[in-house]
């Protein structure tokens, strides 16, 4: 078999060394194992077995060895886990019984649950392969009735298949996090004898209360002879299972036969019901063995996007010619029906694989897999060909990728033939091996395909004789990597992927071997160690290790033992040299202690040598601090992390010593695992999964060796805290774990910040630099932990006050380090000129929630301490003293981070105005600081007198705060004897059209009524008079004019029908709108329009000349001038009668109101805008600016007949005096 190219120099070097006449190294000293047997065929020379080496000693190597190894160690398989001891013992017992010539072992890996399984004899072993040392390995006894062999001998391992289901799994996040903690979850197992079709079902293998065996279902047909198993005539070739939603420990399983028949098994804790849901395609139950493989090949579920417990599921059956789509309803009776069928092997090569090509003899569809997203179907294809030149036969292996139409609608079962194609060809078939050895069908149909591993797009092919080949299309060509070890690891039973800690679809490939445990294949091993496709087979025929195994079978003597020790990926670097063996835990501890002492001594020597200062000076000379300090900050960040990690390790050591004598739960008889230990396990496991080269290391070792990746600790706190602090545990245990985690976070971050403060001179300029503790992942982890602590503290009666007090102190520390992280990031973003609005809002919300929770619990602690100290006597001074002592740290944090709500509550609860005023002086923020917050609280509570009293001390602050609250600002100005300013404020407040013109503080106030506006105007007039400024008389006149207009509006709107509906009840209308309302209401309001013009001012009259002209036209329309003119002529009116008649016209009264000598007009006269006569316009030189009243009336329809009479009324009104009505008294208290 071909091997990775990286091993060739190593083998070449070994050949040279063997040719050198040197004595062979002594045989390795195998230490006996508890199992009582060992491998007798282990050679005395060559590479020792991995379980005879020490991972620690292998990593303590000289620099020459490290340099010589280079990157070769990174492209070799990495050991993940050893077999559990009980599995090793069972293997040994099985081999001692000397079942030669048969493969008695079989195993597999379940991708969904990360559980490995192995069948040895009549026992099924299940364990979590992610743990480096499997502690919880279950041994399930297989009933003899399931074996089906009359002699009672174990049958071939290839006849078994296993399905594992984890109940109540909510998704990949739950699955991965639970696996990382290696916790037991409710899990069901289905075991199927493929030859006899017998089924065994364990509803929950972890249920200790259930001592019963599995539920069994035996096939009712005649027994099949054992010779069928040898010939490979298995009735089932594929089995899939799924849980039934809403049912406890119930599932269904679907099995396919080579003939195409499908069987459905409904499994429950009480019974197994089986029924055939699809007849075989051959019609004779597959008795024609020449075509026994023309039906079903493999079954696979379509991944469900919604949930793993979807009520409607689809699965696909790979046949000899194509793919069938089936649907199954898991609710209201299990219903299975075929939805569609698509041909893959046909005459159209664009739709799949084209057949009947020259030189092509046969095409086999071997296996099929669907990716995690349910989008891509990968099909392994073998083609039997004949070389037309040489005439030799060969087999070509290829991979066909099809795309699934997720929105495909399937017709009814009767129209399956008419179903549209639900798969599309993504690309031409990718050739894996162009010319390979010709194999028989038994070998071909034993091949299995696995997808989803790293590198992205790679697949792994497992042959029936135990060979694993990774294939990937990379850089324009296909590359193959075959799993191989320097010693014989036996067959590869199964392959899967290591579940990613970040819930990604892809993970590193992992394989289950027959003899050497579980190994992972690094991504780099596939890319670098892969080779071009050779003309070789995918089987193990010709393998050098196979020859070793053959020799072993000829000389088996099991008199020694296998030592199940940890395996290190450094086995390749050992070469032929002899490694010393450790002989116990004591020697291991001595080595660890010596290594730690040596490391500490070297570190202290380095610090005392002054090399650090020399390196710092070199960095300064080289200009490392001139490039915005990013590089130097990275170095110092690493120092902070290292300091934090050291303190964290010290804390863990202290907790470990304490846990030996302290039980966390009073209900439990055994102490539970510490929360910090579990967190370290999670972080280390996450690193091991993401970096496959670390899979042979311990989780804690990985954690403490990755100082730069300390952010992963906070990532686990953010995403997996619920698996450390679970709701199923006693509240006291939850609080203890939260206390331990909080203490760890605070210790770590505070140690880093102390390091930063101690070596601040070494840091670059901090402008715009973002430190590690301000990163989102760190803040998210601390916030998630703090939220959990707050939730625990809010639960009544969860724990006693001492525990709550301790947890409260840790929450205070979490609050401090979290808010400091926010401040650092906000400062950096502000200095960079980046947008930080969303971040600032998040900071404020979390700050207020944290401080509020701290203060709420602080009041409980104060009350408890007071009750304990007062001994039942009322002592306010003692209570205040306790209050100040307990709240002092909260007060400091709230003051530092502008937690104004907490500052206000503290001052308010103890009625300390001195403290309040001091905080107002100290806390001056960008938006008014704490002073503005206090003012707002006093206004919302209606304490206006207290507000004004504070205004005496904080004059400028209150004035700025009330600049949008004119209804309150004038009171503050009156108190400060600023009467003129108060008059302007009152004047502005009275003329506000609506509360919307004020700030948000006025949003709850109602609109001012006419009475309220009038009162404010009179107060403004009084204040202006009291102020007696130079131009106060002008201000008083303006106020009087506004009072007149206000009175006019109140009178005008009463004639409006909409006034009764409240539309204009309090709204202040503009003068132009009032004038238009007057013109629409006829004679009764036509004169009011001129009064509005009289009190608005010259600027308004000048800018609204057209409206003024319209008023004169409207005034002329109010009288029948033609009739008056005719009556005056026909009746011969005298001048006295004419004058008396004209005094009743609107034109006369309007002229007298606007142009008479005693007319009251504010700010100028009407003559400046619209003179009476035409000659007055010419006399004043206003020809280009305006018309006259005479010219306006000349355009009236009645002017040709009664123009003289109309002008007489206007001129007469101008010459007569006008007596304005006296102002009505205003009730100031109304």
Image: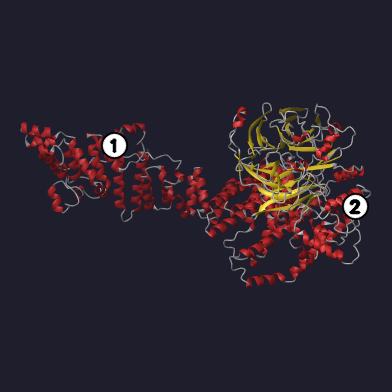
Query: Crowdedness of circle 1 by 10 Å Cα count: few (<14), some, many (20+)?
Result: many
Quarter-wise, where is residue 119 in the image? top right
Total numbered circles = 2
**Frontmost residue, 812 versus 543:** 543
Query: Crowdedness of circle 2 by 10 Å Cα count: few (<14), some, many (20+)?
Result: some
Instruction: Pinpoint residue 908: horizontal percent, then vertical percent.
Output: 57, 46
In the drawing, does residue 871 fall left or right of residue 629? right
Relative to 60, is 398 above or below? above
Q: Earlier in the sequence, mark 2 or mark 1?
A: 2
Instruction: Pinpoint residue 59: horizontal percent, then vertical percent.
Output: 80, 60
What is the quadrant of the C terminus in the image? top left
* Residue for point 78% across, 48% down: 539
Q: Nearer the viewer, mark 2 or mark 1?
A: 2
Measured in 3D between alpha carbons, the distance from the residue under mark 2 to the one under mark 1, in whole angstroms, is: 117 Å
Q: Which residue carries the number 2 mark? A: 41
Relative to 129, is 604 above or below? below
* Residue for point 89% across, 36% down: 153
Q: Which residue carries the number 1 mark? A: 1052
Q: Which mark is residue 678?
A: none
């Amino acid at each position: 078999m071909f091997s990775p190219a990286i091993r060739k120099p190593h083998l070449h070097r070994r050949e040279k060394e063997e040719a050198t006449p040197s004595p062979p190294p002594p045989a390795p000293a195998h230490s006996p194992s508890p199992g009582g047997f060992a491998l007798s065929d282990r050679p005395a020379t060559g590479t020792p077995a991995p379980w005879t080496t020490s991972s620690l000693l292998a990593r303590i190597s000289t620099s020459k060895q490290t340099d010589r190894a280079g990157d070769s160690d990174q492209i070799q398989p990495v050991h993940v886990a050893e077999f559990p001891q009980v599995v090793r013992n069972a293997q040994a017992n099985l081999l001692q019984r000397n079942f030669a010539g048969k493969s008695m072992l079989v195993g597999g890996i379940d991708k969904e649950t990360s559980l490995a399984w192995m069948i040895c004899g009549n026992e099924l072993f299940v364990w979590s392969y992610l743990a480096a040392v499997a502690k919880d390995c279950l041994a399930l006894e297989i009933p003899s009735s399931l074996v089906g062999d009359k002699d009672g001998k174990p049958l071939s391992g290839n006849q078994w298949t296993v399905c594992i289901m984890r109940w109540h799994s909510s998704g990949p996040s739950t699955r991965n996090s639970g696996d990382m903690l290696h916790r037991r979850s409710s899990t069901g197992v289905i075991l199927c004898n493929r030859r006899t079709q017998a089924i065994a079902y364990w509803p929950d293998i972890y249920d200790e209360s259930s001592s019963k065996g599995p539920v069994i279902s035996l096939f009712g047909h005649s027994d099949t002879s054992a010779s069928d198993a040898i010939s490979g005539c298995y009735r089932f070739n594929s089995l899939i299972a799924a849980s039934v939603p809403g049912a406890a420990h119930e599932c269904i399983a679907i099995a396919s036969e080579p003939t195409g028949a499908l069987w459905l098994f409904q499994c429950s804790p009480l019974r197994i019901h089986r029924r055939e849901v699809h007849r075989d395609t051959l019609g004779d139950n597959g008795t024609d063995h020449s075509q026994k493989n023309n039906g079903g090949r493999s079954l696979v579920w379509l991944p469900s996007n919604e949930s793993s417990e979807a009520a409607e599921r689809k699965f696909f059956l790979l046949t000899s010619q194509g793919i069938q789509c089936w649907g199954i309803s898991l609710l209201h009776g299990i219903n299975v029906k075929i939805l569609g069928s698509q041909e893959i092997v046909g005459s159209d090569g664009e739709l799949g694989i084209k057949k009947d090509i020259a030189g092509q003899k046969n095409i086999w569809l071997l296996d099929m897999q669907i990716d995690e997203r349910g989008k891509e179907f990968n099909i392994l294809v073998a083609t039997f060909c004949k070389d037309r030149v040489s005439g030799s036969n060969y087999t070509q292996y290829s991979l066909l990728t099809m795309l699934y139409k997720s929105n495909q609608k399937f017709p009814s079962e009767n129209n399956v033939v008419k179903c549209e194609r639900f798969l599309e060809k993504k690309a031409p078939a990718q050739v894996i091996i162009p010319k390979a050895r010709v194999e028989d069908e038994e070998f071909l149909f034993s091949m299995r395909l696995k997808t989803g591993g790293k590198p992205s797009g790679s697949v792994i092919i497992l042959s029936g004789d135990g060979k694993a080949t990774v294939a990937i299309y990379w850089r324009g060509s296909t590359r193959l990597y075959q799993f191989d070890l320097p010693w014989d690891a036996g067959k590869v039973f199964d392959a899967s992927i290591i579940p990613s800690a970040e819930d990604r679809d892809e993970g590193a490939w992992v394989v289950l071997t027959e003899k050497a445990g579980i190994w992972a294949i690094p991504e780099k091993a596939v890319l670098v160690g892969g080779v071009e496709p050779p003309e070789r087979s995918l089987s193990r025929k010709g393998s050098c290790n196979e020859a070793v195994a053959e020799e072993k079978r000829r000389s088996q003597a099991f008199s020694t033992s296998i030592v199940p020790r940890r395996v290190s990926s450094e086995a390749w670097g050992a070469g032929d040299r002899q490694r010393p063996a450790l002989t116990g835990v004591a020697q291991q501890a001595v080595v660890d202690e010596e290594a730690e002492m040596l490391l500490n001594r070297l570190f202290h020597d380095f610090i005392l040598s002054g090399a650090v200062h020399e390196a710092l000076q070199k960095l300064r000379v080289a200009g490392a601090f001139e490039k915005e300090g990013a590089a130097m900050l990275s170095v110092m960040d690493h120092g902070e992390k290292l300091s934090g990690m050291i303190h964290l390790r010290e804390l863990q050591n202290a907790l470990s010593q304490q846990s030996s004598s302290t039980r966390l739960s009073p209900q439990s008889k055994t102490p539970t695992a510490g929360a910090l230990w579990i967190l370290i396990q999670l972080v280390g496991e996450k690193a091991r999964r993401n970096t496959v080269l670390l899979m042979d290391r311990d989780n804690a070792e990985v954690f403490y060796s990755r100082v730069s990746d300390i952010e992963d600790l906070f990532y686990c706190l953010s995403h997996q805290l619920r698996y450390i602090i679970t709701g199923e545990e006693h509240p006291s245990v939850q609080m203890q774990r939260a206390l331990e985690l909080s203490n760890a976070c605070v210790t770590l971050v505070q140690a880093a910040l102390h390091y930063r403060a101690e070596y601040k001179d070494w840091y670059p300029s901090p402008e715009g630099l973002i430190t590690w503790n301000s990163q989102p992942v760190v803040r998210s982890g601390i916030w998630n932990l703090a939220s959990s602590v707050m939730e625990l503290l809010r639960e009544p009666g969860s724990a006693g006050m001492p525990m709550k007090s301790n947890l409260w102190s840790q929450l205070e520390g979490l609050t401090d380090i979290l808010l400091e992280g926010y401040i650092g990031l906000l400062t950096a973003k502000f200095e960079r000129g980046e947008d930080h609005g969303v971040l600032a809002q998040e900071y404020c919300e979390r700050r207020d929630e944290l401080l509020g929770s701290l203060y709420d619990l602080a009041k409980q602690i104060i009350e408890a301490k007071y009750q304990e100290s007062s001994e039942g006597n009322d002592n306010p001074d003692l209570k205040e003293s306790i209050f100040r002592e307990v709240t002092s740290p909260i007060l400091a944090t709230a003051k530092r981070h502008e937690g104004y709500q907490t500052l206000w509550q503290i001052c308010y609860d103890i009625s300390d105005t001195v403290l309040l005023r001091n905080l107002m002086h100290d806390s001056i923020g960008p938006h008014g600081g704490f002073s503005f917050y206090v003012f707002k609280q006093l206004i919302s509570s209606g304490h206006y007198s207290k507000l004004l009293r504070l205004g005496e001390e904080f004059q400028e602050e209150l004035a700025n705060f009330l600049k949008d609250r004119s209804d309150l600002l004038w009171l503050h100005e009156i108190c400060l004897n600023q009467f003129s300013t108060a008059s302007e404020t009152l004047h502005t407040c009275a003329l506000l059209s609506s509360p919307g013109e004020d700030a948000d503080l006025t949003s709850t106030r109602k609109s001012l009524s006419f009475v309220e506006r009038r009162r404010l105007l009179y107060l403004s007039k009084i204040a202006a008079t009291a102020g007696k400024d130079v131009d106060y008389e002008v201000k008083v006149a303006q106020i009087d004019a506004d009072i007149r207009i206000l009175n006019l509006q109140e009178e005008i709107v009463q004639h409006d029908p909409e006034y009764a509906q409240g539309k204009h009840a309090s709204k202040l209308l503009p003068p132009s709108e009032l004038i238009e309302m007057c013109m629409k209401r006829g004679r009764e309001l036509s004169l009011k329009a001129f009064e509005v013009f009289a009190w608005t001012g010259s600027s308004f009259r000048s800018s609204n000349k057209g409206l003024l002209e319209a008023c004169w036209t409207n005034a002329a329309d109010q009288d029948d001038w033609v009739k008056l003119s005719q009556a005056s002529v026909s009746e011969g009116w005298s001048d006295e009668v004419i004058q008396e008649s004209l005094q009743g016209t609107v034109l006369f009264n309007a002229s007298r109101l606007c142009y008479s000598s005693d007319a009251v007009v504010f700010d100028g006269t009407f003559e400046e805008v619209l003179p009476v006569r035409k000659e007055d316009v010419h006399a004043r030189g206003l020809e280009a600016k305006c018309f006259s009243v005479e010219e306006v009336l000349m355009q009236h329809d009645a002017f040709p007949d009664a123009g003289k009479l109309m002008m007489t009324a206007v001129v007469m009104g101008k010459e007569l005096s006008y007596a304005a009505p006296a102002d009505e008294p205003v009730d100031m208290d109304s």
